[in-house]
Image (cartoon, rainbow, N blue to C red):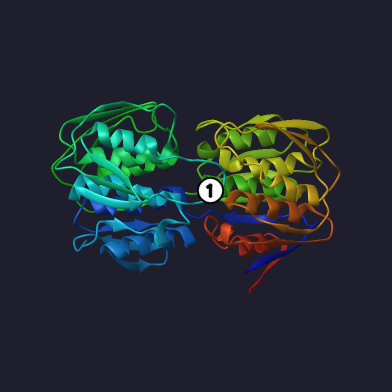
Amino acid sequence: MDRLVIRGGKPLVGSVKVSGAKNAALPAMAAVLLTSEELTLENVPSLQDVATIERLLGFMGVESRVAAPGTIGLTSRAVRRFEVPYDLVRTMRASVLVLGPLLARFGKARVSLPGGCAIGPRPINLHLVGLQAMGAEIDLVEGYVVAKASRLSGTRLLFDTITVTGTENLMMAATLAKGTTVLENAACEPEVEDLARLLQKMGARIEGAGTSTITIEGVEDLTGAPHRIIPDRIEAGTFAVAAAITQGDVLIQGCVPQHFDAVMTKLRDAGAGVAEEAGGVRVRMAARPRPVDIATEPFPGFATDMQAQIMVLMAIAEGKSVITETVFENRFMHIPELLRMGADIAVTGRSALVRGVPFLRGAPVMATDLRASASLVLAGLQARGETVVHRIYHLDRGYETLEAKLRSLGGDIYRVEG
């Protein structure tokens, strides 16, 4: 398997452009199942997860074409299979996003229960409860969700907990349902709002996306549309932390500052200079960070997908900080690897007490999930000596050419294949 070799201690300086958001591209691609006409998606990142969902859609009969670099055209007029097998979904939880569109347009679906990063249980029961409330008959058979419905009907649904993919799945299903659907305690993430904008371009009637209450009035059919995927706020936040942890000066271009405002606030609290400029956000750091306490929350709070990265910054802070993970269980798997690099971190339940040390030390480490991979890369950029990050296939699921972008900023990092 490929690995990254990093020689730390060099400040990152320069400008870097953020890619399109993986977590916005995946539901947008699934939305092609709602129409027989072509969707043209721009700013699609070249990532393993994107390739996986493209293969998944192709298995069902969706035709795809590369219209230009980063732009794909998708058409589902020839869909002939309504099953998504385990081999195509075992690495990616977002595969469940085809369930709602399949039921809404074709009235049937057989979708394997999804896989993905091992960061704790992320059940899809809220998806299934919502689809049942809309009139679907659902059974679980040998690891598959088997669902059918003559036509879904509008309903009012209160999510027990906030779920991004659940909100997206049911919002897509409701676009072709008979009547009005109201989703309460819905996710407010920018990726949900971006999907709603795409669906509206396709002819859907949606109000309230980006708030906790989304109202969808079903229509008879949807059309094709062009759409540009929003920038990746997690990639932007990761580069912001990279600038701070290396005491560098980086302009992050093409991002939407409001999408990662919680990260910028914590970086300012830690002593970084963070300023919005034309075309992006500049992050500067000239000293060790101050300790900052952080608790992850749904948007607009501090994103769970940035928890591992900010922990590395706190690992070299001048003092103690407490980082609390409230969204996912088992999302501290990067900590044993950081301890190998000299970090001082103790875990109690869902909180980690981080005692800052002056610097980290290079070591061979093993990535356990997507965001843990990014945190270990950041640790290697700061550490004295050489760090080798193994199992970086996780990283390739969510960061487009990360090592090349870091090298363009002066980072000493390269990939070893094999």
Pick whichever, 305 or 125, lies toward us.
125
Residue at (60, 60) in percent of width and height: 402
Residue position for label 1: 279
**Relative image position of residue 192 (x, y in whole percent):** 39, 39
Q: Quadrant of residue 332?
A: top right
**Relative image position of residue 276 (x, y in whole percent):** 59, 40
Looking at the image, the residue that sits furthest to the right is: 358
Badge 1 amino acid: Gly
Q: Could you tell whether 7 is left or right of 128 in the image?
A: right
**Relative image position of residue 5 (x, y in whole percent):** 72, 65
Looking at the image, the residue that sits furthest to the bottom is: 418
Residue at (67, 64) in percent of width and height: 407
Residue 27 shows in the view: no
Helix, strand or loop at disc 1? loop
Quadrant occupied by the C terminus: bottom right
Q: Quadrant of residue 64?
A: bottom left
